[in-house]
Amino acid sequence: MRPIQMVDLKQQYEHIKPDVDEAIHNVLDSCAFINGKPVQDFARHLAGYSGLKHVIPCANGTDALQIALMALGLEPGDEVITPSFTYIATTEVIALLRFKPVFVEVDPQTFCISPEAVEKAVTPKTRAIVPVHLYGQSANMEEIMRIAEKYNLHVVEDNAQAIGCDYTFTNGIKKKTGTIGTIGCTSFFPSKNLGCYGDGGAMFTNNDELAERLKMIANHGQKVKYYHEVVGCNSRLDTLQAAILNIKLKKLDDYIAARQKAAAYYNKAFANQPKITTPFTASYTNHVFHQYTLILNDVNRDELNKYLAEHHIPSMIYYPVPAHRQKMFEAFGGAAYQLPQTDWLTERVISLPIHTELDEEQLAFITQKVLSYIN
Ligand SMILES: *Cc1c(COP(=O)(O)O)cnc(C)c1O
């Protein structure tokens, strides 16, 4: 049996090696390392895949969130509603820009931001909502967009974990996550569902003016070289990374299908186990399984993690400390929040290996070890 990893990038690379190696060599030959043709090609291809007008590449997913929030004309102290149960980048950029992160609960079934909690948290200072499509399924975007329209708020989707995921509205219309809000943001960190071989990120929007603004901010606030209209930053997707992403984008739907197949295997093996709650997929979304995350009921999580490690099966806690309990947010009143659902989940979640290269032998081994521990 091949060694089991949380994500097996090496094996995945083996399948696309000739194409990737050729694409890398072409970039080396061209020496167009910054903003080369593959960058523009990739932006166009990803916009086509996503069914929207503009994809603006940038240096990483955190930058995408930061630049998106910079583009919306918010003032210091303006409130941005976001889940506490997420990767730190979502919340960090809000504070970095001197806006006020307002942490709210997630739905304990979907792990995504609770629309009811969002609506309760709206104040006259609220300007934006940052939902996260955590682990690979969409937040309840129809409700979030309804709230956003009602209170005139921007929506910045953190789609770092759910690229390729489809959201279905009650009228039957389907849209890709990241294309529903004012701006969508994603990451091409290597382990993400569409990962490059270094850092990368992108922003999505259908709004022509906003697209220009995002491009300008990512490029030192200039539209015309050496004429700087606003304070921006320097955030670019490498040509090499774009060349790799052009190859991997063609495979994205197959990669998603492979993750879904592995998840289905786990779901079946763990069905009817009272000590394990398998991932729930809401009716309005499919699930692209960036993570396969269980909720443990009456199981010692640390001991399970250790037991699995002894059998060379990695498992991870995403995330061990919710944002509102991070030292980083002490000065933002983090400790004053009461988020019992978030704390409850934080104590009980565990993520098992999931990636495009898991085979049945590995899946059988993992599920057998988990079941033998809990029973
Ligand atoms: C990975 C990730 C990010 C940040 O992406 P980077 O490319 O690592 O900066 C932001 N939000 C979520 C939910 C993520 O998983």
Image: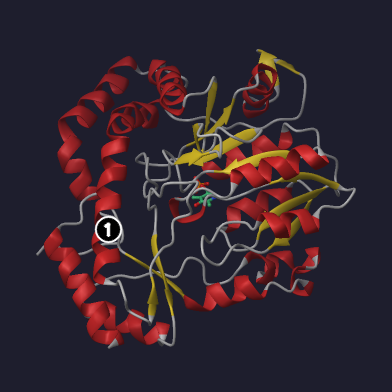
User: Residue 245, percent across and down?
Assistant: 35, 31
Estimate the x, y position of residue 156 in percent, counting from the top left.
65, 40
Q: Residue at x 40, y 50 (%)?
A: 287
| 30 lies above or below 314 | above
26 sits left or right of 341 in the view: left
Residue extending furthest toward the left: 1
Q: Hey, which residue is sitting farthest top in the picture? A: 224
Find residue 275 and report its image quarter: bottom left
**188 in relation to 103, above or below:** above
Name the residue nearer the viewer: 351 or 137. Answer: 137
Q: Is residue 233 left or right of residue 274?
A: right
Q: Residue at x 36, y 39 (%)?
A: 196
Q: Quadrant of the C terminus?
A: bottom left
Image point (40%, 15%), residue name: 37
Q: Of residues 113 and 194, which is closer to you in this image?
A: 113
The image position of residue 124, as x and y in percent, is 90, 48
Instruction: Decide: is 16 above or below 9.
Output: above
Is residue 244 in view from this perspective? yes
In the picture, residue 53 is in which quadrant? top right
Kindly identify which residue carries mark 1: 264
Q: Position of residue 136 (x, y in %)?
A: 44, 51
